[in-house]
Image (tube, rainbow, N blue to C red):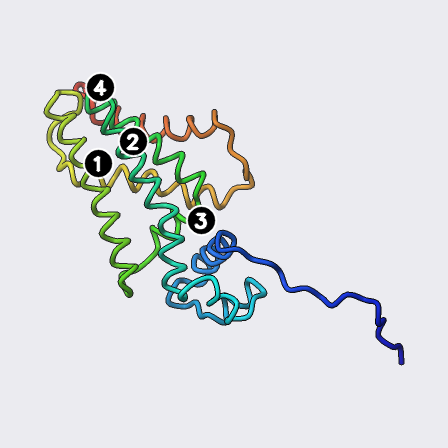
Amino acid sequence: MPHADPTALPARRPRYDLDLLVSVSARVFNERGYDGTSMEDLSRATGLAKSAIYHHTAGKEQLLRLALDRAVVPLFAVAEESLARQERAVGRLRHLVTGQVGLLIDALPYVSLLLRVQGSTETGRWALRQRRAFDRIVADLVAEATAEGDLEPGPDPRLVSRLLSGMVNSIAEWYQSTDDEDLTQARREELADAVLRMAFEGLRPGARA
């Protein structure tokens, strides 16, 4: 029977910082669902003992909030930047949708989690409130662009907001099903343009003529 090498170094556990822990947790939450994920699942996914995870965070819900922040904070930053632009509402709306597409690609695991999280916890309910607040921003821009004559009147701005978000968010499912892991900036702009073209060409005055 072979003897253990006394000079061999013991196997080391992976070293995690909070940033990497949040990243792995987001992946597991997306795969298993937040409610279906246990601390044991996170321990297995990270290779860390649960006590080591608790060294970095208060627990599973805090990891969820930190992961969601990676989608919510830049999403509202894009909204703020768009609203501050000195141009007609339809231009600000275009800028917002383009930024939304770029964020989805750059922060796909976190945006996917934001779209999937349920209101079963306080953090989940907070996330749903953020999504509704963002929808209101889009709806207000749609209403303003309609009042300025750049979009055809008729559809409820809240409905248009949901349709735009639905078109953008569907890219998440499409992107995850492709082998194109690294979308170039030109390709990103092409995706944003496709969403905007399909949405706005059907809403512009005279488009149905």
Which residue was labeled with disc 1?
138
Residue 203, percent across and down?
Answer: 20, 26
Where disc 3 sits, the SS reads helix
Query: Whole-Å distance between the Cαs marked 4 and 3?
Result: 32 Å
Query: Whole-Å distance between the Cαs marked 2 and 4?
Result: 13 Å
**Which of the two residues, 91 or 126, is positioned nearer the viewer here?**
126
Disc nearer the start of the sequence (4/1): 4
Q: The residue under label 1 is which amino acid type?
A: Val
Q: Nearer the viewer, mark 4 or mark 1?
A: 4
Does residue 208 appear in this view? Answer: no
**Which of the two residues, 83 or 32, is positioned nearer the viewer here?**
83
Residue 27, percent across and down?
Answer: 48, 55
Residue 82, percent across and down?
Answer: 27, 29
Task: Check whether the beta carbons of the residues at disc 1 and disc 2 lie within 8 A of each other.
Answer: yes
Where disc 1 sits, the SS reads helix
Q: Residues within 10 Å of mark 2 (few under 14, many from 20)?
A: many
Residue 57, percent across and down?
Answer: 43, 62
Image height of 197 relative to 140, above or below = above
Which residue was labeled with disc 2?
96
Query: Whole-Å distance between the Cαs marked 2 and 3?
Result: 20 Å
What residue do we see at 35% from left, 32% from top?
A: 99
Q: The residue under label 2 is which amino acid type?
A: Leu
Task: Check whether the beta carbons of the residues at disc 2 and disc 4 lie within 8 A of each other.
Answer: no
Determine whether, in the image, residue 63 is placed left or right of residue 24: left
Which residue was labeled with disc 4?
87
Task: Check whether the beta carbons of the residues at disc 4 and disc 1 lie within 8 A of each other.
Answer: no
Disc nearer the start of the sequence (2/4): 4
Q: Spot the residue most to the right.
A: 1
Where disc 4 sits, the SS reads loop
What residue do we see at 32% from left, 40% from top?
A: 75
Which residue was labeled with disc 3?
109
Q: Residues within 10 Å of mark 1 (few under 14, many from 20)?
A: many
